[in-house]
Amino acid sequence: MPNRLAYPLAFASGGLLTLMVLFNGQWAREGTPLFASWMAHGTGTVAALIFLLLLRAGRKPSARPGKAPLWAYLGGLSGAVTVMLTSTTVNSFLALSGTLALGLAGQAGFSLLSDRFGWFGLPARRIGATDLAALALILAGSLLVIFT
Amino acid sequence: MLQPILFALLGGTLVSVSRAINGRLSLATSAMSASFWNHLVGFLFLSAVALLWGGLMPGGWPDAPVTAWFGGTIGVLFVASGSWLVARIGATLTAMLVIAGQMVSGVALDLALGQSDGLLPKAAGVALILAGMVLARRSR
């Protein structure tokens, strides 16, 4: 059942990403990419805290099974390093389009491996031919959008 | 020549890595809680980088439209939704659908902002993406 909701939610969250890149980029236009990312993480921390308080207010504390390992709290490092890497590559010969295209390749390749082997404590999943074909279509369409 | 290529590939890989890590955290807490830790840890790390290497505000506090202040909040919703999704539909399907949404909304935004260069190949790209989404739906 969550799958029904998941498809439109995932597609919509891609739209959120477009808006986020647009708005965060407004800091970077006159500041630095580091400043843009620092501001986004700082204001985001405050926003997340407010969201958490609002969510908690309407719900009694639920007992969740299990404890997260310590590394599970470090996802933010990965995101922060991404910004540092891509802010150098957009200024290289790759420019924005090359950075985006190779970024898609990195995401797709890693996601396939991670699903196949169940990395990071998430369930392993079979990748079928139809999944690969769907991925190929989406990547091909993305390259057309990026490079034109 | 090789270094920017490796950096860009690694950048994309780390997008998926952070989504998987946050997804794991969301299993033990909640998607919004995972997004909170993601932003706090990222903020502390970037603050440390700025203290060590500088370069945070070389030209003083930059002027930006008021919308710039909302980028972080949108990012919180984006990370929370990604954490929720990756734990339910997997990394590949999440990445596929998010990329599809990003591309299609990017083209829509370009149109809304009056940038209609290369509209025909972009429309063809959107058509391919939508076809891929229909196919992804079939496979479940």
Image: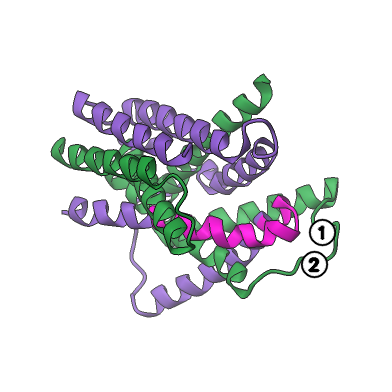
Regarding residue A41, the answer to whether it shows in the image is: no
Secondary structure that dominates the magenta span: helix
Local crowd size for mark 2, using a 10 Å CA cut-off: few (<14), some (14–19), many (≥20): few
Residue drawn 46% across the image and 70% down it: A52
Point out the image quarter for the N terminus of chain A: bottom left
Q: Which residue is mark 1?
A: B57
Instruction: Read off the chain for label 1.
Output: B
In this rendering, position of residue A39 left or right of residue A113: right
Tell me where residue B88 appears, x and y as whole percent: 28, 46
Residue drawn at (66%, 30%), measured in percent from left and top?
Answer: A93
Count the marks: how many? Answer: 2
Q: Is residue A113 shown above or below A7?
A: above
Q: Residue furthest bottom?
A: A57
* Residue A30 included in the magenta stretch of the image: yes
Gap in angstroms between the C-alphas marked 2 and 1:
6 Å
In the image, residue A76 lies in the stretch drawn in magenta: no
- Residue B45 placement, left or right of A125: right
Q: Which chain hosts label 2?
A: B
Secondary structure found at label 2: loop
Range of the magenta residues?
A: A14-36
Are the residues flagged by discs 2 and 1 in contact, CB closer than 8 Å? yes
Mark 2 sits on what residue?
B61
At 69% from the left and 33% from the top, the residue drawn is A92
Label 1 Cα crowd, 10 Å radius (few <14 / some 14-19 / many 20+): some
The amino acid beneath tag 2 is Trp
Which colour denotes chain B?
green
Q: Is residue A131 among what the camera can see?
A: yes
Amino acid on which disc 1 is placed: Met
Q: Position of residue B140 (x, y in %)?
A: 15, 39
Front-most of B61 and A127? B61
